[in-house]
Image: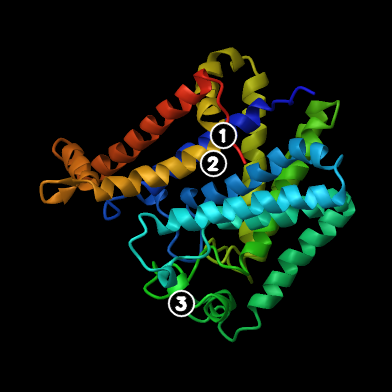
Amino acid sequence: MVKQRFQALDVMRGLTLALMILVNTPGSWEFVYAPLLHADWHGATPTDFVFPFFMFIVGSAMYFSVRGLSQLTFADQTKKILRRVALLFLIGVLLSAYPFTESLDQWRVMGVLQRIALAYGFAAFIILYFGFTGRVVISTLLLVGYWGLLNLSADPYSVEHNIVRQFDLAVLGGSHLWQGKGMPFDPEGILSTFPSIVNVIIGFEATRVLLASEDKEKALSKLFIAALALVGAALLWSSVFPINKSLWTSPFVLLTCGVAILMLILLVKLERSAIGSSIKPVYHVFEIIGKNPLFIYVLAALLANTLYLIPIGDQSAYTALYAAFRSFADPYLASLLFALLQVAVLWFVAWVLHKRNIIISL
């Protein structure tokens, strides 16, 4: 069977990946335009939507893969899903540890790929074995249950005392957590991974509604209403449960899923509009980088970290390259140009793979 393509999804994946590279590799973290930084704690910036968009896209892509999985026995399904979970998780751990200068007892356990792995695994079984109503019930329980879980702490939404951090400290130990908040706290913690499963499920449902419907305009209208409902619910809920990416709070899930659906609708509408032919080249650019998302993401991290290891005089290649941009641009623009160069280099790699029809996947 020929694999069905969903151009808007391919474009959204490529655009999200490009933005992820852009925000992860500035020339200097001291000089980054505000929209390209995460919110310090509560609230959300444009950058905070990048990772949840990727989770949503994982769910969207599952619409195609689940049909193949559904034809397998439970044992084969489990083997295939758990194999992918284990490989993604392992790659994430190794990527965090690169260039392996720290001892094993300092390696970070959780991370971006690790969260994707676990959320994918749980979502895959939920989607395979529960119908629409069951998926809605489970998603609701995950979001409301997580709210209740966080409130078991006397100071539920603080950096230091939230239950996500306390659980990770007890299970993983402080040395295996991210240290970026001035203390051990992992924004991809174990407990905060559970609400992220809903991002994946909603991504699947949005794609199912759109592609399984013969009346695409009616499907788009339904999705638009659903997106507005999600955003509205998120804003209402945020009055008592803050929008917070680091804790991946339930209103954050609803908000990012609502905006992701709106983005998907926009891409579909643009593709089918009168200007569709004029934007095809732009669509093609993002399709190319989105064809090998895992490989390009891993390569992006390896490239950035390797540049730090290459000495040029008394500084690293990373710093020297930023200094080259700094020679003719102000610090903020130079930092952005550095990041854009990383995107361009990795796009070229993706283009080479595209030309040779190479798809690297697990």
Residue at figure coordinates x 50%, y 22% from the top left: 282
Chain-order first, disc 2 or disc 3: 3
Instruction: Estimate the x, y position of residue 354 in percent, counting from the top left.
Output: 52, 22
Q: Nearer the viewer, residue 119 or 94?
A: 94
Query: For the C terminus, which image quadrant?
Result: top right
Mark 1 neighbour class, 10 Å CA radius: few under 14, some 14 to 19, many 20 or more: few
- Are the residues flagged by discs 1 and 3 in contact, CB closer than 8 Å? no
Query: For the N terminus, which image quadrant?
Result: top right
Q: Amino acid at mark 2?
A: Leu
For residue 174, the mark is 3
- Which residue position is annotated with label 2? 294
Instruction: Estimate the x, y position of residue 56 in percent, counting from the top left.
Output: 65, 46
Chain-order first, disc 2 or disc 1: 2
Badge 1 marks a residue whose secondary structure is: loop
Q: Amino acid at mark 3?
A: Gly
Mark 2 neighbour class, 10 Å CA radius: few under 14, some 14 to 19, many 20 or more: some
Question: From the viewer's perspective, is 214 left or right of 287?
Answer: right
Badge 3 marks a residue whose secondary structure is: helix
- Are the residues flagged by discs 2 and 1 in contact, CB closer than 8 Å? yes
344 versus 193 height, above or below: above
Residue at figure coordinates x 67%, y 41% from the top left: 261
Instruction: Estimate the x, y position of residue 344 in percent, counting from the top left.
Output: 37, 30
Badge 2 marks a residue whose secondary structure is: helix
Can residue 231 be seen in the rendering of this structure? no
Can residue 148 be seen in the rendering of this structure? yes
Mark 3 neighbour class, 10 Å CA radius: few under 14, some 14 to 19, many 20 or more: many
Q: Amino acid at mark 1?
A: Ile
For residue 360, the mark is 1
Residue at the outermost bottom position: 154
